[in-house]
Image: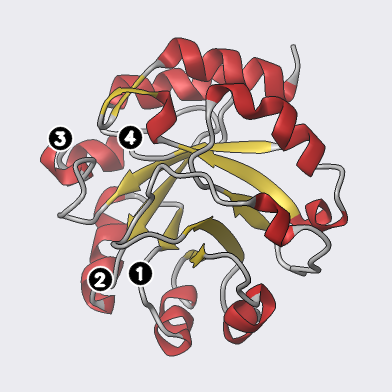
Amino acid sequence: MQIKVCGMTKAEQVLQLDELGVEFAGFIFYPKSPRYVLSHMSMEQLKKLKGKQINKVGVFVNTPVEELLQLVDACGLYSVQLHGDENPAYCEQIAQYVKVVKAFRLREGEDILCKAKDYQGLAGMFLFDTEGAGYGGTGKKFNWDILKGVNVNKPFFLSGGIQPEDVVLIKAFDNDTVAKDLFAVDINSKFELAPGIKDMDKIQTFVKALKGG
């Protein structure tokens, strides 16, 4: 199972993730977020930031198409995560240029497949997170049981307030039929010392417990 650590703001910590074997580093390009990456790093610094295997993912919220594509180039992003109200036509435009992860904020009783069906042929992957009052992650765990038994038929990231001690729950979830499409887990605020500053010891322990070794 692969791992994405989102809300990165420090180059040295991204390189540490790379050494730990983490596959994805998420950078938030939403100015209202306390983890807004361009408040901490320049576009040039981001573009130069490269590890042995880690992939840079830009997280965007309702960003105009041209602005987003310019940032993909300027920052050397591998893929983009659309975490706002982006419609299928928007998603299709972006997907012609860069790999797209479409995020869905879920609530109890929601028809997941109905919500995602118009994006099925457009996004390369999905991400499932907790519904909140605003955009971006809430740090709150949603009930993963609403995904159980669902045939997503698309690789997806599992997000939503994942904590260091959740490895057992993740491994149990991985035994459900829906997990045939589980591509990666997405962690963020529960592994921080402060917004955008990661607790690398917690991440290291989590990575070892989830991946083994």
Q: Is residue 84 above or below residue 96?
A: above
Q: Earlier in the sequence, mark 3 or mark 2?
A: 3
Q: Position of residue 200 (x, y in %)?
A: 42, 15
Q: Is residue 200 left or right of residue 12?
A: right
Q: CA distance from mark 3 to mark 1?
A: 22 Å
Q: Residues within 10 Å of mark 1 (few under 14, many from 20)?
A: some
Q: Position of residue 161 (x, y in %)?
A: 48, 40
Q: Position of residue 37 (x, y in %)?
A: 22, 42
Q: Earlier in the sequence, mark 3 or mark 1?
A: 3
Residue at disc 1, secondary structure: loop
Q: Earlier in the sequence, mark 1 or mark 4?
A: 4
- Of residues 145 and 128, the one drawn nearer to the viewer in this rendering: 145
Q: Position of residue 103 (x, y in %)?
A: 49, 64
**Residue at image mark 2:** 63
Q: Residue at x 50, y 24 (%)?
A: 18
Rendered image quadrant of residue 47: top left
Do the numbered discs 1 and 2 sit on residues whose CB atoms are within 8 Å?
yes
Looking at the image, the residue that sits furthest to the front is 109
Q: Residue at x 48, y 78 (%)?
A: 96
Q: CA distance from mark 4 to mark 3?
A: 9 Å
Q: Residue at x 74, y 68 (%)?
A: 152
Do the numbered discs 3 and 1 sit on residues whose CB atoms are within 8 Å?
no
Q: Earlier in the sequence, mark 1 or mark 2?
A: 2
Closest to the camera, between mark 1 and mark 4, is 1
**Residue at image mark 3:** 40
**Residue at image mark 4:** 8
Amino acid type of the residue tagged 3 in the rendering: His
**Residue at image mark 1:** 84
